[in-house]
Image (spheres, helix red, strand yellow):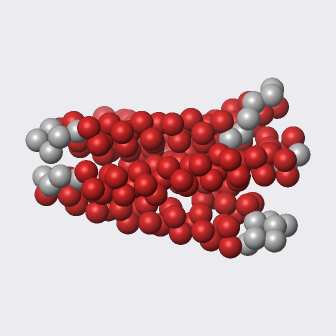
């Protein structure tokens, strides 16, 4: 009887430890991201720098995807998965943090809708790209379409949206935005 209770207690402790590990792995990255993002701005960092670095990675992956041949299935799959994850993290941060503050106090409330619409188009093309990858088809035209949509989108964000927000937000708000961006990106594992 004592051995049975000891075994039950050991199993319960193991399950409790596993549950704590799972909860910690899902909760700690967003909390850590929020703290580090905010502290970066308080030490003179730019809250939009991370998003701009994402832009460079996204464009680089698109270029690599254009170079990948249809017979390089493993390489194309790797590029697709890297691209999809990077785009998902980035889009989540922009859609949940940046776009909601874009038109606040602005005469152009359609600008925010336009940005969300472009993200929706990107997701549709991403779905088409995945289907072509699974079918072993050439994805060059879809990657070019994605690139043709993403490049001007990035240009608009970096030359219009981000500078407007830098000008509009005070240092405390910029720190909050940076923390929120880091937190949102950390949600996608």
- Where in the figure is residue 123, as x and y percent of width and height? 41, 62
Above or below residue 143? Residue 10 is above
Say how many tags the image has.
Answer: 0
Relative placement, left or right, of 126 versus 47 is left
Q: Residue at x 48, y 53 (%)?
A: 150
Q: Toward the viewer: 104 or 149?
A: 149
Quadrant of res 34: top right
Question: For this view, does 29 lie left or right of residue 6?
Answer: right
Which residue appears at 84% of the width and 47% of the height?
167
Q: Residue 7 at x, y = what percent? A: 32, 37
Which residue is at the front of the view, 103 or 30? 103
Q: Determine the image quadrant of residue 51.
A: top right
Residue 122: percent from left, percent from top: 43, 60
Q: Which residue is drawn at 67% across and 60% down?
A: 99
- For this view, does 91 lie left or right of residue 39? left
Pick out the residue farthest to the top. Answer: 43
Task: Tell me the quadrant of the picture where the C terminus can be found.
Answer: top left
> Does residue 150 appear in the picture of this structure?
yes
Is there any visible trace of residue 93 in the rendered image?
Answer: no
Question: Considering the image in quadrants, where does the N terminus appear?
Answer: top left
Residue 25 placement (x, y as % from top left):
49, 39
144 is higher (above) or lower (below) than 58: below
What residue is at 81 percent from the left and 67 percent from the top?
Answer: 106
Q: Is residue 179 above or below residue 36?
A: below
Left or right, 141 with respect to 179, comes to: left
């Amino acid at each position: 009887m004592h051995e049975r209770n000891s075994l039950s207690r050991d199993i319960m402790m193991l399950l409790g430890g596993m549950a704590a590990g799972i909860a910690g792995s899902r909760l700690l990255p967003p909390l850590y991201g929020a703290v580090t993002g905010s502290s970066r701005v308080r030490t003179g960092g730019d809250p939009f720098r991370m998003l701009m670095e994402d832009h460079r990675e996204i464009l680089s992956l698109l270029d690599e995807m254009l170079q990948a041949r249809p017979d390089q299935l493993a390489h194309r799959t790797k590029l697709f998965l890297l691209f999809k994850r990077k785009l998902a993290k980035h889009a989540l941060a922009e859609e949940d943090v940046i776009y909601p503050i874009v038109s606040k106090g602005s005469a152009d409330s359609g600008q925010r809708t336009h940005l969300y619409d472009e993200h929706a188009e990107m997701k549709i093309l991403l779905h088409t790209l995945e289907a072509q990858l699974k079918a072993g088809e050439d994805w060059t035209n879809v990657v070019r379409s994605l690139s043709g949509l993403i490049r001007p989108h990035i240009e608009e964000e970096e030359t219009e949206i981000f500078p407007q927000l830098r000008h509009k937000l005070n240092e405390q708000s910029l720190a909050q935005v940076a923390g929120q961006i880091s937190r949102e990106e950390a949600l996608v594992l």
